[in-house]
Image: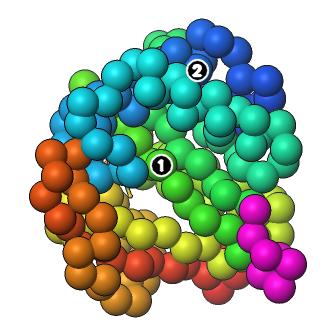
Amino acid sequence: MSAGLDIAVLAAPVADSALDELASVLVDCVAGGASVSFMAPFSHHDGLKFFRKVSASVADGDTVLLAARLDGRIIGTVQLGLDTPPNQPHRADVKKMLVHRSARRSGVGAALMTAVEDEARQRGRWLLVLDTVPGENGYRLYKRAGWTESGIIPNYALFPDGRLCNTAMFWKRLDQ
Ligand SMILES: CC(C)(COP(=O)(O)OP(=O)(O)OC[C@H]1O[C@@H](n2cnc3c(N)ncnc32)[C@H](O)[C@@H]1OP(=O)(O)O)[C@@H](O)C(=O)NCCC(=O)NCCS
């Protein structure tokens, strides 16, 4: 893992400076072609709008927002979605695992995954679920982190440039 890397949970209200850096990470990921809900062109304003909504969800207790800082600047993030139905109190969703292209391939993604799994454990959420595009960077990260792939849904979403992509559903139990 990179020296100078720090991973922290961001409490609500998330500071404007942090929202700005989080938006920059998201914009960079979309510009790099990642299928993470958004289409190109995706502006900094769009990114800020998204993370302001996330901040509101953090304030409601529905989301845990983590940020990876390298030398003080946010270069990665991931979320734990806690807003599950009453019959799924033991489950949570891992969402928006994003690392700026300038900081990739040095273990930031793996460190964010370890941190978000720890946050889930602390909240009694022992079953985690996520989906990702098969064959992309996230897919390999989740396999390496011991997640189980349960199947592929064809044509589930679009890449930012409009091409269709499949999604692979993953799950992980934290109590075994
Ligand atoms: C997926 C993503 C978060 C991974 O982030 P990352 O910080 O690069 O992840 P890691 O560094 O832990 O691992 C990435 C690769 O670097 C390698 N690596 C890790 N540390 C390394 C080091 N010190 N030296 C060399 N290689 C290293 C890993 O083995 C891995 O290799 P592989 O992809 O060839 O299997 C990032 O690619 C990303 O943001 N993608 C766009 C958004 C996205 O698609 N997110 C997933 C949505 S579900």
Q: Nearer the viewer, residue 163 or 166?
A: 163
Q: Which residues are magenta?
A: 83-90
Question: Circle 1 sits in a helix, a strand or a loop, which is it?
Answer: strand
Label 1 CB sits under 8 Å from any ligand 1 atom: yes
The answer to whether 76 appears left or right of 80 in the picture is: left
- Answer few, some or many: residues within 10 Å of disc 1's Cα (few below 14, many 20 plus, some between 14 and 19): some
**Residue at (72, 54) in percent of width and height:** 119
Q: Position of residue 98 (x, y in %)?
A: 40, 42
- Answer few, some or many: residues within 10 Å of disc 2's Cα (few below 14, many 20 plus, some between 14 and 19): many
Label 2 CB sits under 8 Å from any ligand 1 atom: no
| Magenta stretch contains residue 87 | yes
In the picture, the disc for residue 96 is 1
Judge whether 12 appears above or below 134 on screen: above
The answer to whether 34 appears left or right of 46 in the picture is: left
Q: Which residue is mark 2?
A: 19
Q: Locate residue 9: give its quadrant.
A: top right
